[in-house]
C-alpha cells in the first residue's frame, strides 16, 4: 500500500527556525546568516562591519565552527557579545543549535546579530536557522567559478559579498564571469565587491545592512520567510 | 555502536537529512497503523547538496531495529532547468552549471528549480503473514 507523505525533509528544522525567528522578532533583532568557504573572510567582515556601524546598532555574534573558540575569542576581544557553537564534526549549523545559542546571548542589548556559519559552501544554506537574511561571502582567491559549482548556496542568498578585492591584481579572477554565474541562479541579490583589509567597498555593504534594519523597524512590513 | 560509528566520522549533512526522512516515514506509517515500511520515495533536487549513496548509507544505519529496516529508498531527482534570456532555449543543468547557452552561445542564463528535498510517499504493508511470528518473539 502506498501512502502519500509529500513533506519537505527538513520541516522539523524549519519549525524550530520559525521559533527562533519569533524570538528574534520579539527582541527586535535583525539576524544575518553569513555563509562562506573556510577563509573567505566571514569573521573579518563581521569585525570590519562592526567598526563602521553607528553606536546605535549594537551587534552580537554566534560563531559556528567544527572546533575551537578562535573566532569567538577574536570577536570578544573587540568587546562584542559572542557565543561559540562547536558542531563537533557536523558541517553546518541548524536551527536547534541556534535556539541554544540564543539563550547564551544578552539579546536585549543587540540589534544586529551575525550568525557565522561553518565554513562550507555545500550545505549550510539548506538548513534554515530563523535568520532574516542569508549572505554568502565569496573571495577572490577562491576563484570566479564558485556560483557555477555551488549554485544552491548562491541561489538562496539575499546578498553576496565578494571579499579580498585588494588582491584582484594577482589572481586570474574574472569578475564579470563571477557575476554572470551569480545572476544565473539569483537575478536580484545585491553584490558587494569589497576588501575587508583595505576597507574599500565596505560603505555600500554597511548602508545596505542599515536599510534592512530600517525595514525591520517598520511594523507594517511582514518578515520574509 | 551506531553512535560510535557516527561520532568517529565526519558527520556529513546527509545524516541530518536522513534522520528526518526516517522520522517522516515512521510518522506516516504509524498514523496508518502500518507494520512495515517497504519503500520510501524521495524527491531530491539536483541543486541540493544531498548525495543518494550517502543518504542510503545513513539510512541503513539509522533504520536498524525500526519498522523501516530494509526499506528500499527510491530517489527521484528533480532537475534544475536553465533558461536562456536571449533566445529562450531551456535545458537541464546540474552543477557545475554550463556558463553558455548551447543554442545561441549567449551568457545570460537563468536557472530554476532543483532545490527541494522531500519525502513524496512511502510504501507499507500491514505485514500480517510475516508479522505474526515477529510479534510473538517480541512479547
Image (spheres, coloured by chain):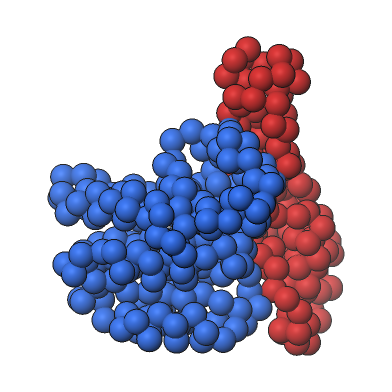
Identify the residue shown where x is 76% and y is 68%.
B58
Q: Is residue A51 left or right of residue A149?
A: left
Location of residue B4 with respect to A193 vertically, above or below: below
In front here: A209 or B131?
Answer: A209
Q: Quadrant of residue A76?
A: bottom left
Hue used for the chain lettered A: blue
Location of residue A208 with respect to B82 vertically, above or below: below
Identify the residue shown where x is 53% and y is 53%.
A165
In front here: A75 or A117?
Answer: A75
* Residue A29 rendering spot, x and y as whole percentages: 26, 65
* Residue A168 rendering spot, x and y as whole percentages: 59, 51
Identify the residue shown where x is 20% and y is 65%.
A54
In front here: A87 or A147?
Answer: A147
Location of residue A119 with respect to A158 vertically, above or below: below
Hue used for the chain lettered B: red
Q: Is residue A136 something one can see in this rendering? A: no
* Residue A183 rendering spot, x and y as whole percentages: 54, 34
Q: Is residue A30 left or right of residue B51?
A: left
Q: Is residue B43 left or right of residue A29?
A: right
Q: Count the marks.
A: 0
Location of residue B40 with respect to B45 vertically, above or below: below
Q: Is residue A122 something one can see in this rendering? A: yes
Q: Quadrant of residue B84?
A: top right
* Residue B92 rendering spot, x and y as whole percentages: 72, 29
Identify the residue shown where x is 63% and y is 74%.
A90
In front here: A158 or B120?
Answer: A158
Amino acid at each position: 500500500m502506498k501512502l502519500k507523505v509529500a513533506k519537505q525533509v527538513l520541516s522539523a528544522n524549519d519549525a524550530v527556525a520559525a521559533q527562533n525567528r519569533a524570538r528574534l522578532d520579539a527582541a527586535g533583532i535583525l539576524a544575518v546568516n553569513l555563509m562562506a568557504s573556510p577563509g573567505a573572510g566571514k569573521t573579518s567582515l563581521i569585525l570590519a562591519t562592526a567598526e563602521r556601524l553607528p553606536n546605535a546598532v549594537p551587534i552580537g555574534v554566534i560563531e559556528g565552527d567544527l572546533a575551537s573558540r578562535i573566532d569567538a575569542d577574536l570577536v570578544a576581544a573587540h568587546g562584542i557579545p559572542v557565543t561559540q557553537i562547536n558542531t563537533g564534526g557536523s558541517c553546518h549549523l541548524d536551527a536547534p543549535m541556534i535556539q541554544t545559542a540564543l539563550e547564551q546571548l544578552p539579546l536585549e542589548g543587540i540589534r544586529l546579530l551575525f550568525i557565522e556559519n561553518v565554513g562550507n559552501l555545500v550545505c549550510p544554506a539548506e538548513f534554515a536557522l530563523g535568520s532574516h537574511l542569508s549572505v554568502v561571502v565569496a573571495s577572490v582567491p577562491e576563484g570566479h567559478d564558485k556560483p557555477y559549482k555551488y549554485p544552491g548556496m548562491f541561489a538562496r542568498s539575499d546578498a553576496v559579498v565578494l571579499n579580498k578585492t585588494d588582491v584582484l591584481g594577482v589572481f586570474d579572477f574574472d569578475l564579470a564571469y563571477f557575476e554572470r554565474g551569480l545572476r544565473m541562479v539569483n537575478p536580484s541579490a545585491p553584490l558587494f565587491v569589497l576588501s575587508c583589509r583595505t576597507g574599500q567597498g565596505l560603505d555600500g555593504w554597511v548602508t545596505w545592512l542599515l536599510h534592512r534594519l530600517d525595514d525591520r523597524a517598520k511594523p507594517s512590513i511582514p518578515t520574509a520567510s | 555502536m551506531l553512535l560510535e560509528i557516527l561520532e568517529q566520522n565526519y558527520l556529513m549533512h546527509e545524516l541530518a537529512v536522513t534522520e528526518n526522512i526516517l522520522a517522516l516515514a515512521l510518522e506516516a506509517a504509524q498514523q496508518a497503523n502500518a507494520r512495515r515500511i517497504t519503500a520510501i520515495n524521495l524527491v531530491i533536487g539536483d541543486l541540493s547538496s544531498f548525495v543518494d549513496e550517502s543518504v542510503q548509507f545513513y539510512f541503513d544505519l539509522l533504520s536498524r531495529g525500526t519498522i523501516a529496516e530494509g526499506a528500499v529508498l527510491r530517489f527521484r531527482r528533480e532537475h534544475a532547468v536553465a533558461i536562456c534570456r536571449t533566445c529562450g532555449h531551456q535545458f537541464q543543468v546540474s552543477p557545475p552549471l554550463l556558463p553558455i547557452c548551447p543554442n545561441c552561445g549567449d551568457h545570460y542564463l537563468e536557472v530554476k528549480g532543483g532545490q527541494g528535498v522531500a519525502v513524496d510517499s512511502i510504501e507499507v504493508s500491514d505485514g500480517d503473514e510475516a508479522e505474526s511470528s515477529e510479534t510473538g518473539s517480541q512479547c
